[in-house]
Image (spheres, rainbow, N blue to C red):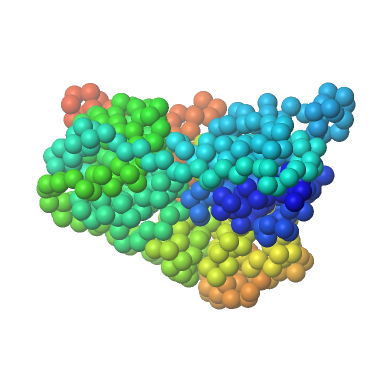
Amino acid sequence: MKIYGGRLVARTIKRFGVRHLFSLPGHQILSVYDACLNETIDLISTRHEASAVFMAQALSFAEREARVVLLAGGPELTNALTAIAQAYYSNTPLVVISGTNTFKKRDKGFPQDMDQLQVVRPFTKWARTCHDVYRIPEYIATAFRYAARGRPGPTYVEIPYDVLETKVDFNAVSFPTKPKQLRPCGDKDSLETLVSMLEKARRPVAIAGSGALWSGAEAELQTFIEKTGIPLTLASAALAMPFPAQKVSSNFGIIRPFRETVAEADLILLLGTRMNFGIGFGQAPFFTSAQKIAQIDIHPEEIDTNRPIDLGITGDLKATLAALNDMHISMKSLAGWHQQVSQKTRAYEAELRPLAESNTCPIHPLRLVSDLESLRSDDSFLVLDGANSILWALMAAKPHPEGGVLISSLGELQAIGAGVPQTIALKRRFPQRQIILHTGDGSFGYGLVEMETALRYNIPIVVVIHNDQGWGMTRDMQIDFFGKDREIGNQLGVVRYDRLVEGFGGHGEFVQKPDELKPALERALGVGKPACVNVLVDPLPKSPGLKTFMLMEVMLGKETYLDRIPLWMKKLRAVGLEGLATRMMLQNLDHRLHNELKGKQ
């Protein structure tokens, strides 16, 4: 049987477990499109190339292995570049397959002729061109191997379209097996040292990040915290994995309990997470010099970033925790410490409850996210997109035992606009599950046209818009830096996104009053077609997450939070009273973070 090279692409990815392929049509890749019919691969055609990449990225998160996006060359690739870079900076395993011009047409002024490898190499772990049709399966297998092993990330294979359209004898093609995931374990001596540190600790805390998700370590992580009694916080991509909320001691998005718990701990375990902005770079006042820090990471170069680590262990988190769970650990009783951490969280939630139940108009942002969280099912995926809207959502969103919370702007790049395509991909993959997007009004604009894609494929997603009538984060920063009378360029006004979705044929709801909120959400969840709940929220309150970013950012000569700490507090540290200094610094910070939570001006 003679088949095109495009059929080899489809057959190979299908052998590797890919059932959904995301793309935007282009002449260079039509042979792969044709092959999807033969291989029964579900091809979703998007309205923008970046959307196709974001869709594949969402399935990588949900299925914990590399998924595939198919692009034509030239402008299709450059349009997709931000999404590929987002996957790179969020350490997402992803295989990008692209068409390109034929070798004979290179450098002759032919349309869409460009050096694509040079463009993608800075944002991929591995990038190659396949010039031999018989080697297509080999190159794709290599791309899968590089994407998944070690620290995950995107890889790239481009195939000239004359190669894709070359016919070969199917029986003469060798198909490699799917690359296995390797799970290196931390060395025995390091694990024994960690056991000793655990046994001496009186106030340990564990922070699990993306390494927990990509290694599939949720069972081992749960066993570890049950065995040791250590309070646990899930951060970044770890929120996307299924996990019982009652096993998590403090929400990463709840600023005060998390910050205070970390500051008071005597041992901090970093489990597949980075010492980055999210945890204050390991610096004062969030960390102290007396604390011990142990870090487990698949990437050895990550250990000791931003501050020296007392114990660094290189290894896959799943394998390393499994080995640790098999060891004898004589922990001191942590009941008192665990109770103290839980009380902080409960007290903070009680303090926020009046805002979460507020009946004021405009609707307080915390009322929106609290009502939304109350309607989530155990198996739901909640996708968070935007900037300010994400920071509010993280104050209420919790892990779910069969679902998860996917933050679309993970990683240092922090690209917004992935929410709608990621929600579409998840709902296509899990049609019986509840899939909801909570997005800002600005970020929704990026993916608005993909609501037509959802209608075209009959994918009933639910989009909830945190509509603060502008680019909320930059607007608040602009006012803080320049003054209220200098705001410019950040207002979007009251846009009826619900009517735009209705124009595509979807369901729209416009919500202005708190008592309208839950009924509108319930109607959207039950309508059975793409739905948009456009909620006008009060733009004046500022979340603690936003204030944290503003206080730690240096712009236009403004001082960071540390620069604003009164000098006498700093002197307490200099005379050896670090504990007292830390508590007072955190109280000072807490006031700054919460003084505009209710919208005070």
On screen, residue 324 above or below 363: above
Q: Residue at x 52, y 39 (%)?
A: 145
Q: Is residue 186 left or right of residue 434?
A: left
Q: Position of residue 308 (x, y in %)?
A: 30, 26
**282 on left or right of 162:** left
Query: For this rendering, which residue is in front, 237 or 223?
Result: 223
What is the x, y in percent for residue 50?
68, 45
Asked whether residue 295 is in view, the answer is no
Q: Nearer the viewer, residue 171 or 521?
A: 171
Q: Position of residue 427 (x, y in %)?
A: 59, 63
Q: Residue at x 36, y 53 (%)?
A: 218
Left or right? Give the position of 250 relative to 63.
Answer: left
The residue closer to the viewer here, 119 or 349, is 119
Residue 307 visible in image: yes
* Residue 581 against residue 237 in the figure, above or below: above
The residue that appears at 12% across and 47% down in the rendered structure is: 330
Residue shown at the point (15%, 46%) measured from the top left = 329
* Picture coordinates of residue 370, whole percent (x, y): 45, 64
Q: Image quarter for residue 486?
A: top right
